[in-house]
Image (spheres, grey):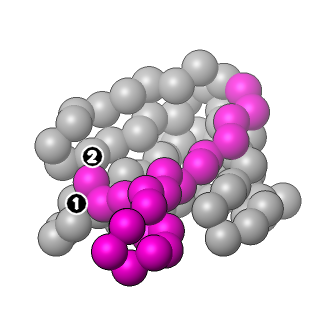
Amino acid sequence: MKKVKNLLLKKGEGEHSHIISSSKDFIKYKNLGENLMLLEVPKDSKVTHEEHGTIIPKKGNYYVISQQEFDPLLGDFRAVFD
């Protein structure tokens, strides 16, 4: 697993992003595929987003899944933007 202090979870439309950060410990993560990530989150972490505010997750392991939607006009799946 890789270790970081700040991690971009998802880039939204325009300048909006979901970012998890930790001031003391490292956030550990591993990409498991194109739309799936495993996180090991320390207790001092927070998730920030310019529009949604701040979320304080509990210490633990989390899966981050990028939401997809089906476009019937294109006949294909695409990423959902926030």
Q: Hey, what amino acid is under mark 1?
A: His
Q: In the image, residue 31 lies at what x, y percent? A: 74, 64
Residue at left offset 49%, top offset 68%: 77
Mark drawn on residue 49: 2
78 or 1: which is nearer to us? 78
Which mark identifies residue 16?
Answer: 1
Rendered residue at 38%/79% (across/down):
74
Q: Are marks 1 and 2 in contact (CB under 8 Å)?
A: yes
Disc 1 and disc 2: Cα gap in Å?
A: 7 Å
Q: Is 24 above or below relative to 69?
A: above
Front position in the image: 61 or 75? 75
Q: Is residue 71 magenta?
A: yes
Magenta region includes residue 12 = no
Disc 2 on helix, strand or loop?
strand
Residue, x 74% and y 67% (percent of image)? 33
Q: Which amino acid does the dot numbered 2 rest on?
A: His
Magenta region: which residues? 60-82
